Image (cartoon, rainbow, N blue to C red):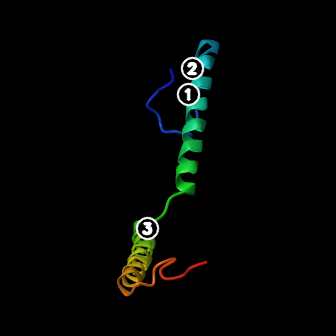
Amino acid sequence: MLDKHRQAGSRMVLDGPEELELALRLFRDDTLMAKREARRKQYFVAPSARRKIKSIAARRRASRARRKRSAILLGEGPRRGVRR
C-alpha cells in the first residue's frame, strides 16, 4: 500500500496495478511541488541583502527629496523666472 505522507522523492513499491493511478498522481504532485519550490528559490533574496537594497533605495529617495525641497526654497524650480 502506498503512503500518502511519505517523503517526496522516495521509492514507491506497488502491490498491484490498481495502485498505479494513485502512484502516478503522487508522482505528479511531487514534481509540481519541486517545480514550485525551485521557482520560489530562484527569486529568493537573503534578508541581509534585502535590507541593504532597501536602505540604498531609501537613501536615494531621501537625497532626491532634499534636493527637491532645497530647489523649491531657493526658487530654482522648473520654469521659474524663465520665459520662452
Q: Residue at x 48, y 63 (%)?
A: 45
In the image as oriented, which residue stretches furthest toward the bottom? 74
Q: Is residue 65 left or right of residue 37?
A: left
| Cα separation between marks 3 and 1 | 36 Å
Residue corresponding to mark 2: 22
Separation of disc 2 and disc 3 at Cα? 42 Å
Evaluate if marks 3 and 1 touch, with contact meaning CB atoms under 8 Å apart: no
Q: Is residue 10 visible?
A: no
Read off the residue under disc 3. Answer: 50
Residue 55: image quadrant is bottom left
**The image quarter in which residue 42 lies:** bottom right
From mark 1 to mark 2, how far is it between C-alphas? 6 Å
- Per the image, label 2 sits on a secondary structure element best described as helix
Q: Position of residue 70 (x, y in %)?
A: 37, 84
Instruction: Identify which residue, 28 or 75, lies in the foreground.
Output: 75
The residue positioned farthest toward the top in the image shown? 18
Circle 3 sits in a helix, a strand or a loop, which is it?
Answer: helix
**Residue that mark 1 sits on:** 26
Q: Residues within 10 Å of mark 3 (few under 14, many from 20)?
A: few
* Circle 2 Cα neighbour tier, 10 Å, few/some/many (<14 / 14–19 / ≥20): some
Vertical relation: 83 (above or below) 6:
below
Which residue appears at 47% of the width and 80% of the height? 80
Give the percent coordinates (x, y) of residue 65: 39, 76
Q: For residue 42, which numbered disc appears in the image?
A: none
Please state which amino acid type lies under the numbered disc 1. Leu
Q: Nearer the viewer, mark 2 or mark 3?
A: 3
In depth, the one of 28 and 67 nearer the eye is: 67
| Residue 8 image point, x, y percent | 52, 39
